[in-house]
Amino acid sequence: MAIKQKRFMLAESDIPTRWYNIQAEMLNKPAPMLNPKTKEPVTVEELSKLISLQAARQELNFTDAWIDIPEPVLDMYRYYRSTPLVRAYGLEKALGTPAHIYFKNESASPIGSHKLNSALPQAYYCKEEGATNITTETGAGQWGCALSYASKVFGLECAVYQVKISYEQKPYRRSVMQAFGAQVTPSPSMSTRAGKDILTKYPNHQGSLGTAISEAVELALTTPGCKYSLGSVMSHVSLHQTIIGLEAELQMQMAGEYPDVVIGCFGGGSNFSGIAFPFMRHNIAGERATRFVAAEPESCPKLTRGKFCYDFGDESGYTPLMPMYSLGHNFKPANIHAGGLRYHGAGVVVSQLLKDKLMEAVDVSQLSSFEAGLLFAKSEGIVPAPESCHAIAAAIEEAKQCIPTGEEKVILFCLSGHGLMDMSAYDQFISGSLGNYTISDADIMKNVANL
């Protein structure tokens, strides 16, 4: 009997040395981000007051399709890249589907998620440009852990504002950040003007990524030698994450297949962009007709039910105005356990791609996501992060559609991280104490009416 190959790895010499910049090849470029005071397009100079100069240049680069990865960053990538591409034979068998299911296992990084792919270059650029400190926000904590580690690698001090509900729900991610030497503060806090204003208005505010971004941005703008770093939404973050899809493309060649559908969970867009954009370039060129599906939480449906408009990336209005699908920057998300997906808006590039119908979006309920996560754990032996469970749920639905037709559809999804620090959430699901959260059309309309 022939042995079925399950795991595909690249040789170190085959790891991509350039990121793919989809902005350069999009037929319809995204509308510009705007300075909220002047309403003029934001410049590299303006952005570099907040983030590193190199990141600002990458953010507004609409001409270069390929951007070299700095050698010190490549050196760190080689510690854990390539990550495995895995044929999910166990999941296929459990579903009884003829579909071929593959997943790119980004949980194999040192901090257990895809977030390190952007944390390393962002920390490197800040250090090269003379920064001494770096600050950020984090939801569930994957990004905070990644930047805390990357900061230590390149000799920077790191301050993390973690969404308060996640700070309380996920204490071990907080411990990991602290183990890497970061200062971790639950947000909203009394340490910034933005935090004080939010708590004055809403004393029991459990936090959101929008509030945490406001606090981190304020700290960066008021502290000498400090730069801000964002883990999703921004175009330069999506750029860095394309290392995922570029590897996956080579690994799918090793498997002798090409995906009919590519799926990623969706909060602000970093994980979805990373797996999807390298494959999407072939659709843009007219060479392929792959479908791309972003799986977001039902309780935070910015892609499926949000409004395309200019909105702030944070609650207090410190960031540029961005053309995005949004639920409103003052949206207060439900306290679901997929903390990394509780963001009110979508990235500028992803929003334009959705507007142009180059991708699709589905929303997934919390209970459906954990049901999918447990099935995956039982069949593949990996406990996925609650965020990743949304991509798994979408992949399962695609695979089920093949059962009555017998279609051997090739499905690729990104396992963005493991859930070994999220077991309290699984405990609650297994005990029956978790529920679903939805938001009414009336509440959405009320929230976006003034945008």
Image: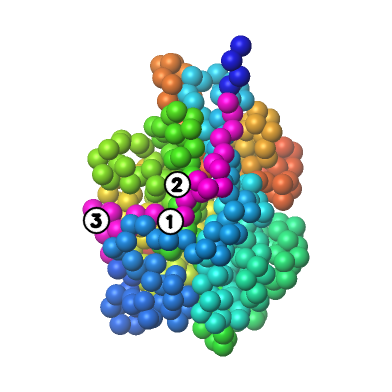
166 lies above or below 256: below
Which segment did they paint magenta? 5-31
Decide if residue 139 is in sight here. Answer: no
The quarter of the picture where the N terminus appears is top right
Q: Label 3: state its secondary structure.
A: loop
Q: Position of residue 325 (x, y in %)?
A: 37, 57
The alpha-carbon separation of the residues under discs 3 and 1 comes to 21 Å
Residue carrying label 2? 246
User: Residue at the spot x=24%, y=56% of the render?
Assistant: 28
- How crowded pointer 1 is (Cα within 10 Å; few <14, some 14-19, many 20+) is rated as many
Depth check: 360 or 146 in front?
A: 146
Amino acid type for the residue under numbered disc 1 = Trp
Please identify the quarter of the rendering in which residue 95 is found.
Answer: top right
First reached walking from the N terminus: tag 2 or tag 1: 1
Q: Label 2: state its secondary structure.
A: helix
Q: How is the image coloured?
A: rainbow
> Tags 2 and 3 in contact by the CB under 8 Å rule?
no
Q: Could you tell whether 155 is left or right of 222 in the image?
A: right
Q: Could you tell whether 104 is left or right of 425 in the image?
A: left
Residue carrying label 1? 19
Residue carrying label 3? 28
The alpha-carbon separation of the residues under discs 2 and 3 comes to 23 Å
Amino acid type for the residue under numbered disc 3 = Asn
Q: Position of residue 52 (x, y in %)?
A: 48, 75
> Tags 2 and 1 in contact by the CB under 8 Å rule?
yes
The alpha-carbon separation of the residues under discs 2 and 1 comes to 8 Å
Q: Position of residue 360 (x, y in %)?
A: 37, 43
Q: Position of residue 296 (x, y in %)?
A: 48, 47
User: Residue at the spot x=46%, y=40% of the render?
Assistant: 250
